[in-house]
Image (cartoon, helix red, strand yellow):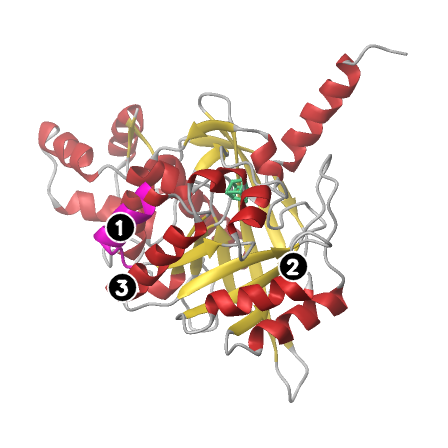
Amino acid sequence: MYSLFDHEALEAFRTEHKRQPYRIRQIETAIFHQWIKDIDEITTLSKDDRKLLSDTFDVIPFTCEKILEDEETTKFLFRTTDGKVIETVLMYHYHTNEDTGVIKLNRVTLCISSQVGCAVGCIFCVTGTLGLLKNLHRTEILAQVIYANNYLKQKLGKKEDGSLWSVRNVVFMGMGEPLMNYPNVKKVCEFLSSEYYFGLSSKRITVSTSGVYQGLEKFITDNLPVSLAFSLHAPNQELRAHLVPMAKFYTLDKLMELMDEYVRVSDRQVFYEYVMIRDENDTDEVAHQLGRLLRNRRGHLNLIPYNQNPAIDLHESDPEQIKRFKKIVESYDVTVTIRQNMGRKEKSACGQLGYEAAQEKLKHATSDQPKQ
Ligand code: SF4
């Protein structure tokens, strides 16, 4: 099967079947602007052409196995053709009108996966416990966005201005380390930022990395029109290598040099992500180190309270300590936000993707143990 995201394959198909060039535009408009996920929904094509097309192409190269939802998030579990599970999360951001007190949906963010599992092995993340199972192909990454937009179309319909609800921000913060699957991630970023396809601005696409030199160097050279988030989690090499085992191979000094290089080349700030784990990386002393590391750097620090996971014996920092930590870092003239946790109820929150798979693995490991 070819993917309808493959413009060249579609063009070759059109030539072979002697169809008019405008047919391509009709198909791509249906996918990228009307968010159809089934060829049969392309009503601008005849029934015979839809049949012909669906014998050769598909739109969504996976099946949706489960949808878990709460007020803040929708988590999709997709099954790939080779049997792996991809997790993708929609996050709903609301706005309260201060005069009337009316709460309205303001925007939707989509957290997408670039791999199944992850090789980085951060000690606080359940995806890391699965190991790397697969690099996702660009069609499997793009299809997450199309599927989510199709879901929003069904669920929310049109906005007050008459346009369809769709994801406003896309963040590569789902399963996997995006820069370890760079060729596919790069292609997806090009699609997302292209006016012809998704037309998202650089502020609305964020690639998040735990720090992989080679990938970062390519990312900086390519100067993709997207934002960069660096999962810092610790202000010194020793603590970082403990929390992010792969960091043993990539020193923090060199990574910070690359962050400076990124700011210089792109003229954008870096978003520093910092998961707050009680008694691990949340002390006053660490806050001072972090302040010293980030002062005079163009960036924004996000503090993320740790989300609980099966078989990971860590705890979120005390809310009072998070506030104190924030104040200390701010005293170094660093901009800091405490990130609101979303999706804990359905295990869709940061670091929780793969929760069900990890729980399953744990169950098997326990039942395989010899009885005393
Ligand atoms: S936090 Fe990100 S980089 Fe670390 S193990 Fe999880 S998915 Fe991989």
* Label 2 SS: loop
Q: Can residue 333 be seen by looking at this rendering?
A: yes
Q: Which residues are magenta?
A: 214-225
Q: How many marks?
A: 3
Marks 1, 3: nearer the viewer: 3
Instruction: Name the disc covering residue 341, or none.
Output: 2
Q: Which residue is mark 3?
A: 266
Say what amino acid the circle numbered 3 marks: Ser
Marks 2, 3: nearer the viewer: 3
Pointer 1 and pointer 2: residues touching (CB < 8 Å)?
no
| Residue 221 part of the magenta segment | yes
Q: Which residue is mark 1?
A: 190
* Label 1 SS: helix
Q: Nearer the viewer, residue 211 or 116?
A: 211
Q: Is residue 78 above or below residue 366?
A: below
- Spatial separation of the CA atoms under disc 1 and disc 2: 29 Å
Query: Is 132 on the left or on the right of 17, as rendered?
Result: right
Pointer 1 and pointer 3: residues touching (CB < 8 Å)?
no
Residue 308: x %, y % from top left: 72, 46
